[in-house]
Amino acid sequence: MKIRVLTILFLAFLSCKNATEKETEQIQIAVDSTKLKINATEKQIKKIKPELEFQKISEIIKTNFGTKNPEFKEVYKPLEMEYYTIIDSSKVISFKRYSEFLIIEFENQTNSDVEFKKIKTIAEKSLKDKKELFDYYGVFSKGGISFNKADKWIIAHLLRCNMYPKDYKIDKKFTSELEKLDSEIDWIRSYCGWGKMEIK
């Protein structure tokens, strides 16, 4: 009888020990997986770039071109429609103008990349044949234009045929200032009469 009682007590002790060990293992696994999740989340956060605020672009316009506080207004519908022959209007959040600037905002950088590529493809084709630009006269202004893509924005700067070399330098400096921002930058620049096209 004593042996039976001792055997039962011994088995009970073993089962309690095994249960405690399993609980400890489960707690350890839970803690380890939580650490892994935290580490993975921290890595993802480091990969995400903060979205470029338009205020930074506006400041560069002000300092580079000596303007005061730019007031952006709605774009004239005919001009807007000219652009929509190339880019997808459903991806455009806003389309504004200020003086000789056109500012197109997209939902995200992916959309602006795709739509800018459409403009760039036409510009690249025009290097072989200027006639490629004839159907897009309203977009590729005959007086010249520079396109800068920064993050989710496409900034078009209308140039003129009576510009001095220093004016082109200011436009190039504008592109250089945008390139200093922590963002994906791409650009195109055409000169008066489509005589010259510069592509990044």
Image (cartoon, rainbow, N blue to C red):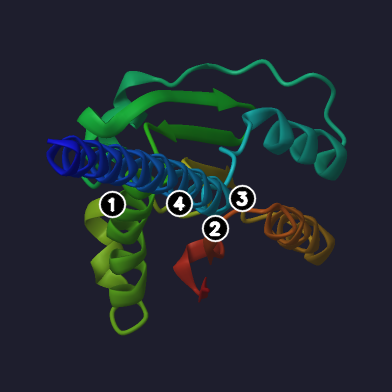
In the picture as drawn, the residue positioned furthest to the bottom comes out as: 128
In the picture as drawn, the residue positioned furthest to the front comes out as: 1
- Name the residue located 55 percent from the left edge and 47 percent from the top edge: 42
Q: Which residue is mark 2?
A: 184
Comparing marks 2 and 3, which lies closer to the viewer? 2
Dot 4 alpha-carbon crowd within 10 angstroms: few under 14, some 14 to 19, many 20 or more? few
Mark earlier in primary sequence (2, 1): 1
Q: Which residue is mark 4?
A: 36
Q: Are the residues flagged by discs 2 and 1 in contact, CB closer than 8 Å?
A: no
Could you say whether the residue bearing mark 1 is in a helix, strand or loop? helix
- Splitting the image into 4 quarters, where does residue 121 fall? bottom left
- Name the residue located 72 percent from the left edge and 62 percent from the top edge: 172
Q: Are the residues flagged by discs 4 and 1 in contact, CB closer than 8 Å?
A: no
Q: CA distance from mark 1 to mark 3?
A: 16 Å
Spot occupied by residue 184 in the image (x, y as percentages of width and height):
54, 58
Q: CA distance from mark 2 to mark 3?
A: 23 Å
Q: Going by the image, does 59 lie left or right of 93?
A: right
62 shown above or below 167:
above
- Splitting the image into 4 quarters, where does residue 62 fall? top right
Comparing marks 2 and 1, which lies closer to the viewer? 2
Q: Which residue is mark 1?
A: 136
Q: Are the residues flagged by discs 2 and 4 in contact, CB closer than 8 Å?
A: no
Mark earlier in primary sequence (1, 3): 1
Amino acid type assigned to the residue bearing label 2 in the image = Glu
Could you say whether the residue bearing mark 3 is in a helix, strand or loop? loop
Could you say whether the residue bearing mark 2 is in a helix, strand or loop? loop
